[in-house]
Amino acid sequence: MAITPDRRVLVSEFGAGIIRDVTEPGDYRNPTVRRYAWNLKNPGSIQPITDGRILVADAGAGAIVDVSEPGEVTARDVLYEGISHPYSLVEFRQRLLVSFSDNLMVGMAEIKPGGRYLPEDVFVHGFPVVKTLEPYPALLGCGGSWVGMILDDRLVLAHSALGAIFDVTAGGIFDELRASRYTWGLTLPLGMTVDPVDGNLYVTERGTGVIKRIPKVGGYARFAETFIAGFAEPSCIRFMPDGTEAYVCDRSWNAVYRLELERR
């Protein structure tokens, strides 16, 4: 899910191969209702970037696709290809990075527009793939069970199976990065975002059906403050830029919830 600069709410439908504009509430059971982009294979993370483009990680196609213009996706929209199961896109320090898995390990690679994946593109690597959750445990939530996010000019990477979020700002290998956990003790974290008002990290826990507010110092999160509870399988949360509304995807109910927030 993504909130665009013009306040549209875009949601990837992984199995249907489409992106919907769900800004307006309604019944979206008909797959053609408010389609924004289609002819994708398994779209995951949607990322508006600073130059005005909107990119999506198409896990099934192993590609990063430009969906700035609504409509049917074609070969000319492919920005980068040849990467195994890309999941979560993030723009960090004027670089585009995407998390990926080759079913042997999880990592993050730098996207070089117009190119194909090469081993030297890897920025983070060696995180384990845990195959006992589902056949492809990464193909869930906000572009995957391995989600990148910027937090106070730090790049953090969530690993659902490990129940932890790691500071991967400097890149490197998991054996070196495991000591730089930002927060841990989470139950299947699937999506995360930063509140534009208070700057805290908000994480959806698939395993508990809650969204937790993680303090800026990080740390053990088993008993972190619950922001909102009662979901079945929350997979993604996004805030409007002014922080007055939040949107939550619940993959179990195939639904998106809008939350009106009162700021004190």
Image (spheres, helix red, strand yellow):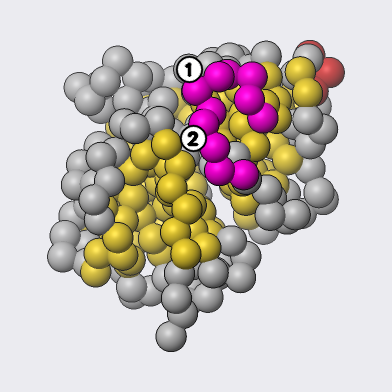
Q: Nearer the viewer, residue 234 or 118?
A: 234
Q: Which residue is mark 1?
A: 15
Q: Is there any visible trace of residue 14 in the rendered image? A: yes
Q: Is residue 137 left or right of residue 71?
A: left
Q: Residue at x 37, y 39 (%)?
A: 250
Quadrant of the snapshot with the C terminus: bottom left
Q: Is residue 131 left or right of residue 6?
A: left
The extreme left residue here reads 223
Q: Which residues are drawn in magenta?
A: 24-34
Q: Is residue 54 left or right of residue 101?
A: right
Amino acid type at image mark 1: Gly
| Alpha-carbon span between mark 2 and mark 1 | 12 Å
First reached walking from the N terminus: tag 2 or tag 1:
1
| Snapshot quadrant of residue 80 | top right
Counting from the top left corner in percent of width and height, residue 160 is at: 30, 40
Q: Which mark is residue 143?
A: 2
Residue 222 lies within the magenta run? no
Q: Secondary structure at mark 2?
A: loop
Q: Nearer the viewer, residue 193 or 113?
A: 193
Q: Is residue 37 left or right of residue 165?
A: right
Q: Residue at x 33, y 73 (%)?
A: 215
Amino acid type at image mark 2: Gly
The extreme bottom residue here reads 264
Q: Residues within 10 Å of mark 2 (few under 14, many from 20)?
A: many
